[in-house]
Image: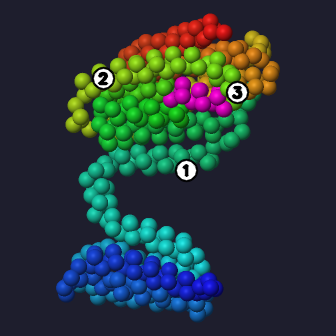
């Protein structure tokens, strides 16, 4: 049996596209003398006319028929008795016509776009209610600011380092600023969706997989601007360290399993400590905060992101100067210095060296823990700088407990042959 002709497939797709969009418009146009002009029959014929235009003369005929359709839509709009100032139906008529033409070349794409268009049309009431009743002016401004930072400013920043040590790359630093703003936005959305009792904890855990330090910075800004969410922010900051520990386990396992096994007792101890501390502050936050409270203020403060970037840049420069001053004394110093920025890179480097036989798995594990320790110190500095004294001091016991558990677990692991 021979496959159907491409023209038959295209015409069938155009018919389906027109009927799908027309079905939604038919339900929307109402009944009686005051009903709208276009329904399921009109849109089906419009989509078929687009397909036939492509059959007759390709894009030129399609353009001519499109102009004719636009003229008819304008005349219909001028003579319409309805008071609705919207142009949705007229624009949808043109889209249906173009999708009908597209069906002759790419029927799958045309059908998919028709589904998207129909969903948008059917969600009219919900979209309007959400924009007018749920979304605030401040949230709109913050969303536009985040979009500008990510889609306008970020592509324009230089990718090459601008310092003598080759570590200050403007695009990477600005990406951190975008990250902080995005994490704050995630926390804000979690607050609105899940409530203040668990919203920040969930946001902290999920955002920690992107960057625990950036998460602590973002939640520090939240704790400073909204004191009533202070303990929830501490719980989220502690939960972000859980994500760091999970990532370290996965990265070292993928790079060198033996090094990961040497690290296992240390990371297990640190993970238990982080879970316990995050759980403690989650319970405290749940007792103090009412579920009915709405998240105050704006989704993020750009100043928090800028200060965090400046702090990271300063830390990188200081680390480079220390390494240059002390000299390259091996993996331990390099890992500890790199840990001020993040734990992932030094962990992978140390495990890779162990995999290559350049160092032992035991010493590689120590190097990873050194990076973990300096990274924990940088988290406290970030918490104090951006979240204030109270935020930092309440987070400090959890960080110290996590470090002690990590080194204690490593020590116990050395006793096991």
Pointer 1: residues within 10 angstroms few (<14), some, or many (20+)? few
The image position of residue 320, as x and y in percent, is: 70, 21
Q: Give whichever of 228, 71 is nearer the camera.
A: 228
Comparing labels 1 and 3, the label whose residue is closer to the camera: 3
2 or 3: tag closer to the N-terminus: 3
Tell me if residue 218 comes above or below residue 358 in the rendering. below
Q: Is residue 63 left or right of residue 286?
A: right
Residue identifier under label 2: 283
Tell me if residue 197 comes above or below residue 114 in the rendering. above
Asked whether residue 388 is in view, the answer is no
Residue identifier under label 1: 151
Q: Residue at x 60, y 35 (%)?
A: 173
Q: Residue at x 31, y 48 (%)?
A: 136
Question: Was residue 108 drawn as part of the magenta stretch in this picture?
Answer: no
Residue identifier under label 3: 256
Residue that protrudes farthest toward the bottom in the picture: 56
- As helix, strand or loop, the secondary structure at mark 3 comes to loop
State which region is magenta: 243-254
Q: Is residue 395 left or right of residue 359?
A: left
The image position of residue 240, as x and y in percent, is: 47, 28
Asked whether residue 257 is in view, the answer is yes
């Amino acid at each position: 049996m021979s496959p159907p002709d491409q023209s038959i497939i295209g015409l069938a797709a155009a018919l389906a596209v027109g009927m799908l969009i027309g079905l939604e418009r038919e339900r929307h146009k109402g009944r009686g003398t005051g009903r709208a002009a276009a329904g399921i029959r009109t849109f089906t014929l419009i989509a078929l006319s687009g397909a036939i235009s492509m059959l007759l003369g390709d894009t030129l005929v399609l353009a001519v028929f499109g102009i004719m359709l636009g003229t008819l839509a304008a005349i219909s709009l001028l003579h319409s008795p309805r008071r609705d100032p919207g142009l949705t139906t007229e624009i949808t008529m043109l889209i249906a016509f173009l999708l009908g033409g597209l069906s002759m070349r790419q029927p799958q794409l045309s059908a998919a776009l028709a589904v998207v268009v129909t969903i948008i049309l059917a969600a009219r009431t919900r979209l309007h209610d959400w924009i007018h009743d749920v979304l605030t002016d401040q949230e709109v401004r913050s969303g536009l600011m985040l979009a500008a930072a990510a889609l306008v400013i970020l592509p324009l920043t230089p990718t090459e380092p601008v310092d003598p040590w080759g570590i200050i790359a403007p695009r990477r630093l600005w990406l951190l600023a975008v990250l902080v703003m995005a994490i704050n936005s995630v926390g804000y959305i979690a607050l609105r969706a899940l409530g203040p009792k668990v919203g920040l904890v969930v946001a902290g855990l999920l955002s920690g997989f992107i960057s625990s330090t950036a998460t602590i910075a973002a939640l520090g800004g939240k704790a400073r601007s909204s004191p009533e969410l202070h303990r929830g922010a501490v719980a989220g900051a502690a939960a972000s360290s859980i994500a760091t520990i999970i990532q370290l386990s996965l990265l070292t396992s993928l790079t060198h399993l033996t090094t990961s096994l040497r690290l296992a007792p240390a990371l297990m101890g640190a993970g238990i400590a982080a879970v316990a501390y995050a759980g403690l502050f989650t319970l405290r936050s749940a007792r103090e905060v009412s579920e009915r409270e709405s998240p105050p203020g704006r989704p993020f403060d750009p100043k928090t992101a800028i200060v965090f970037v400046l702090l990271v840049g300063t830390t990188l420069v200081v680390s480079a100067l220390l390494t240059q001053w002390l000299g390259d004394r091996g993996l331990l110093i390099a890992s500890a210095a790199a840990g001020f920025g993040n734990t992932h890179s030094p962990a992978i480097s140390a495990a890779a060296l162990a995999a290559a036989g350049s160092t032992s798995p035991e010493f590689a594990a120590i190097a990873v823990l050194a990076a973990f320790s300096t990274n924990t110190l940088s988290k406290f500095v970030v918490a104090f700088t951006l979240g204030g004294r109270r935020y930092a001091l309440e987070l400090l016991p959890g960080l110290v407990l996590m470090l002690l558990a990590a080194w204690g677990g490593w020590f116990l692991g050395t006793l096991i042959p």
